Image: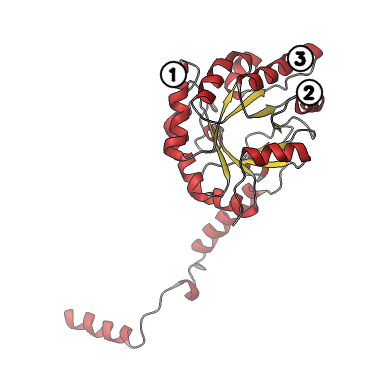
Amino acid sequence: MQKKKGLLDFQRMKKEGEKVTWLTCYEYPMALFEEQAGIDMILVGDSMGMCVYGYPGGTMPVTMDECIVHTEAVRRGAPNTFVMGDMPFLSYQTTTEEAVRNAGRFYKEAGVDAIKLEGGRRVTKVIRAIVDAGMVVCGHIGLTPQSTGQFGGYKAQGRTAESAYDVIKDARAVQEAGAQLLLLEAVTPEVGKFITEDLEIPVYGIGAGLYCDGQLLIVHDMLGIWQAFKPRFVKRYAHMAEDMVKAFQDYIREIKEGKFPEDVHCYKMIEGEAEKLAELVKKQK
């Protein structure tokens, strides 16, 4: 059983140069496996909109209720891992009061250790309010999927000096607002390195280069389950989609050919009971 890490551990790891490992997760069995492997952090991301539900709108249709249900399942599967709930679209953009209430739901109903929300300078008021309510906030800047319409699609950020400086200003604002952790998505390694060294809080990357304090990937991407597209920053450590399709095909073929189930897959009657059953059936005719 691994020892659960907390904020103090992540701060120490940043100072000592020890990288944090982070994956998304949406269900109980996967949470079991991730904890068994020794992952440091789990994010129950709104990426479930694509990976679990297949919503055409990606992350946008995901609701608080869906996030809570999946986070509860992950917490049960990974009781000794730092679990973070992802605030879905419109769960924190309307009013500060609603943002605090929704963040609190993650704590009260799913037992999270932190929540994550997207945005830089424009969400500092919300970050402050959630932190003031006693909760841990992870900021998320760079490419923020809930705002891809404003970016013109899923495009890397900070590729010019001016846009890079905008990302840096967002990072500083998020830390100033009280966020204890920060996620950088789809920025250049130069920007990732500068922000990681500039901020006192741990900075983690998903497509932000090697210099961040740790790395996050979507589990369906790194396992090769998600097939619709492969972001540039994804490394596939397995090819489970191909393995699963082959397993399904083998299953179908063996049933059609009468090869499954075999005797080893069947229950046995107690010795002599088959004959008794035959007699009972015969008498009833």
Q: Which residue is mark 3?
A: 165
Residue type marked 2: Val
- Return the disc, 2 or 3, that comes first in the chain's sequence: 3
Residue type marked 3: Tyr
Callout 2 secondary element: helix
For the residues labelled 2 and 3, the Cα–Cα distance comes to: 9 Å
- Residue 97 has which mark? 1
* Contact, mark 2 vs mark 1 (Cβ under 8 Å): no
Q: Which residue is mark 2?
A: 191
Q: Residues within 10 Å of mark 1 (few under 14, many from 20)?
A: few
* Contact, mark 2 vs mark 3 (Cβ under 8 Å): no
Question: Which of labels 1 and 3 is toward the front?
Answer: 1
Residue at the limit of the structure toward the top, as seen here: 162
Q: Is residue 273 left or right of residue 149?
A: left
- Return the disc, 1 or 3, that comes first in the chain's sequence: 1
Q: Is residue 167 left or right of residue 177?
A: right
> Residue at the spot x=43%, y=20% of the render?
98
- Give 47 or 77, whichever is nearer the viewer: 77
Q: Quadrant of the N terminus?
A: bottom right
Snapshot quadrant of residue 45: top right
User: Do we see residue 266 in this rendering?
Assistant: yes
Q: Position of residue 227 (x, y in %)?
A: 63, 39
- Residue 178 has which mark? none
- Return the disc, 2 or 1, that comes first in the chain's sequence: 1
Q: Position of residue 23 (x, y in %)?
A: 63, 41
